[in-house]
Amino acid sequence: MRGRGLAAATVLVVLCGGSAAVADTTTAGSGARNIIYIQGDGLGLGQRDLLRLALKGKNGRLAMDGLAATGLVRTASDDPGEIVTDSAAAATALATGHKTRNGAVGVDGNGRPLETILERAKRAGKSTGLVTTAQVTGASPAAFAAHVPSRDSQSDIAKQYIENSRPDVLLGGGEDWWYPQGNPGLWPDKPGEESRSPYGNLVERAQRTGYTYVRDGDELRATRANRILGLFANEDMVDYGPDGVGKYAPRVPLQQMARKALDTLSKNPRGFFLFLEEEGTDGMSHENNAHGVIDAGRALDATVAEVLRFVRTHPDTLVIIGGDHETGGLSIENYDASDTDPDQDGPFDVPGSKLRFTVDWTTHDHTGADTPVTAEGPGSTRLGGTVQNTDVHWVMRLASGL
Ligand SMILES: [Zn+2]
């Protein structure tokens, strides 16, 4: 970062133009032994409202809404041609504190590698993990532990994981990038989803270098290994599609993956950095499938509750829940039986009332909306304002002294 020589708290003031909440001058470096960043991909304010209304009712509260600090995150990337970010640039901002162009993973606009918070944690002797219902080599987790100019280079990302950044826990989908052409791996190939690693069998290579490979939820539950690789789908762990077609049913639930990651990483007395991601909130929003968003959001909120139970007994943990961008332009509307707008989803019941609502969408793409962030633990109050996505990186760094 340009201001590395400055006191860390000062750097934040410069970055945020003096936002009072973020300019909190709490002493840097005291407090957070563990950092857990939980991402609902595509989780905008509309998605959080939808989940709250559909799952908890009008006056209910999601687990993710019960944290001490709430703020808004500006998500735009530093792209020459687009104002709206993609997941790669957004995750790079969080992971490195630098905005970059869309598609770039852990590198700046010129393709130069940027050190990530996960790599810093590793250097400080902490354990590290990447857990997602997307492909584990997908853009969001990848930006924390790999450096490639294009998010499509997923076999390169896998190779960098096992050769360079070596996260202790790697759980998600995407085994196609780990096996060479002609070797389908455990999950059958299908047209358009074939094994394609140009580097041979990366699962075997991971095993040779100390990873225990687990193939399903039972093996994940049973292992006591300190270094775990689990690939639970040929590509995505979720079948995306419009209402009635797409189905949220990952083979291993996010909550179970999170539980194992917490058990494994918390063995390290120096602490850990863990990135946890629910991809279904984005994938289903791309499909304008509000039922799918609700199913994915239910899993995400159960995972948040699991993490908060861990935090209760490990108060030296900073936990942050955010979205990298909004997807779909989702809005909540009153149910009107005479409205025949084909973009509408629903109606949905509001638990504990006779009220119903519908969901309307404006796009199948990402939008430029700010996303809500909630946080708890050492340093979390710095997120109680409007901040840039790069500031979230600095909040993690300040809280942990990394
Ligand atoms: Zn997306």
Image (spheres, grey):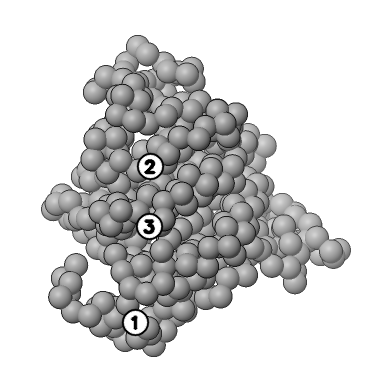
Q: Quadrant of residue 12?
A: bottom left
Q: Residue 281: x percent and y percent?
A: 54, 50
Density class for disc 2 (Cα within 10 Å; few <14, some 14-19, many ≥20) is many
Which amino acid does the dot numbered 1 rest on?
A: Thr
First in sequence: mark 2 or mark 3?
2
- Compared to residue 252, the image places residue 395 above or below, namely below
Q: Which mark is residue 270?
A: 3
First in sequence: mark 3 or mark 1?
1
Image quadrant for the C terminus?
bottom left
Q: Residue at x 48, y 44 (%)?
A: 264
Q: Of helix, strand and loop, which one carries label 1?
A: loop
Image quadrant for the N terminus?
bottom left
In this rendering, which labeled residue sits more in front, label 2 or label 3?
A: 3
- Compared to residue 327, the image places residue 225 above or below, namely above
Say whether mark 3 is within 8 Å of ligand 1.
Answer: no
Q: Of helix, strand and loop, which one carries label 2?
A: loop
Q: Residue 70: x percent and y percent?
A: 52, 74
Question: Circle 1 sits on which residue?
Answer: 27
Q: Residue at x 41, y 16 (%)?
A: 184
Question: Circle 2 sits on which residue?
Answer: 168
- Report how many numbered discs are placed on residues in the image: 3
Density class for disc 3 (Cα within 10 Å; few <14, some 14-19, many ≥20) is some
